[in-house]
């Protein structure tokens, strides 16, 4: 059976993240805390959902140094964002001051933003740690994880 992301008015976006990365887990926890409207759902890059969904866009779920966002899933405006564009999209959907920060960083060229993103991605395990497996969501979070 092919995966089909179910879009609801409150969760049209899906974040794909490295489930064993401390920084990525921190980002997911940050979004969970600040996304009171429930706009985002989450799936680890190591899972089947990521593999099937990203393949539709020619992206590789094994590229663990990249965070992806499937924005507006299952709609005519569905698109896959990656790296700094994905992070800034997430921040732009959160309340102020996070959306203001996203607007501020968008003034920098994507090549510069992605260069900084790549530097952090290459060193994230050393600085933020790594786990052997994806963290299990708490009961109140389970509906937001695929």
Image: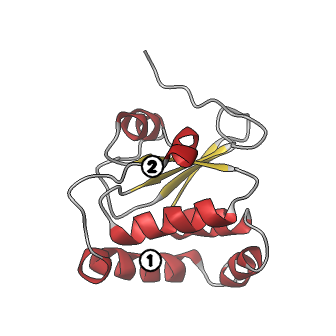
Q: Is 48 located above or below residue 113 in the figure?
A: above
**Mark 1, residues whose alpha carbon is within 10 Å: few (<14), some, or many (≥20)?**
some
Front in this rendered view, residue 119 or 139: 139
As drawn, the label of residue 137 is 2
> What residue lies at 42% left-to-right and 35% top-to-bottom?
49
In the image, is 24 to the left or to the right of 107? left
Secondary structure category for the residue under label 2: loop
> What residue lies at 76% left-to-right and 80% top-to-bottom?
97
Point out residue 81 in the picture as x, y percentages from the top left corner. Answer: 56, 55
Q: Earlier in the sequence, mark 1 or mark 2?
A: 1
Is residue 47 visible to the viewer in this orientation of the structure?
yes
Point out residue 27 in the picture as x, y percentages from the top left corner. Answer: 50, 68
Front in this rendered view, residue 70 or 35: 35
The residue that mark 1 highlights is 117
Point out residue 58 in the picture as x, y percentages from the top left corner. Answer: 42, 41
Front in this rendered view, residue 80 or 31: 31
Front of the two marks 1 and 2: 2
Is residue 85 visible to the viewer in this orientation of the structure?
no
In the image, is 92 to the left or to the right of 116? right
| The quadrant where residue 126 appears | bottom left
Q: Is 131 located above or below residue 48 in the figure?
A: below
Secondary structure category for the residue under label 1: helix
> What residue lies at 32% left-to-right and 65% top-to-bottom?
21
> What residue lies at 20% left-to-right and 57% top-to-bottom?
132
């Amino acid at each position: 059976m092919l995966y089909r992301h179910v879009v609801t008015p409150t969760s049209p976006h899906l974040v794909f993240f490295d489930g064993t990365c401390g920084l990525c887990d921190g980002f997911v926890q940050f979004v969970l805390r600040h996304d009171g409207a429930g706009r985002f759902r989450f799936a680890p890059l190591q899972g089947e959902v990521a593999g099937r969904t990203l393949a539709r866009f020619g992206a590789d779920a094994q590229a663990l140094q990249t965070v992806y966002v499937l924005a507006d899933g299952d709609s005519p405006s569905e698109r896959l964002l990656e790296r700094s564009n994905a992070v800034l999209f997430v921040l732009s959907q959160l309340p102020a001051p996070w959306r203001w920060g996203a607007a501020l960083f968008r003034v920098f060229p994507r090549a510069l933003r992605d260069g900084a993103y790549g530097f952090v991605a290459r060193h994230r395990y050393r600085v933020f740690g790594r786990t052997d497996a994806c963290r299990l969501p708490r009961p109140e979070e389970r509906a937001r994880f695929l």
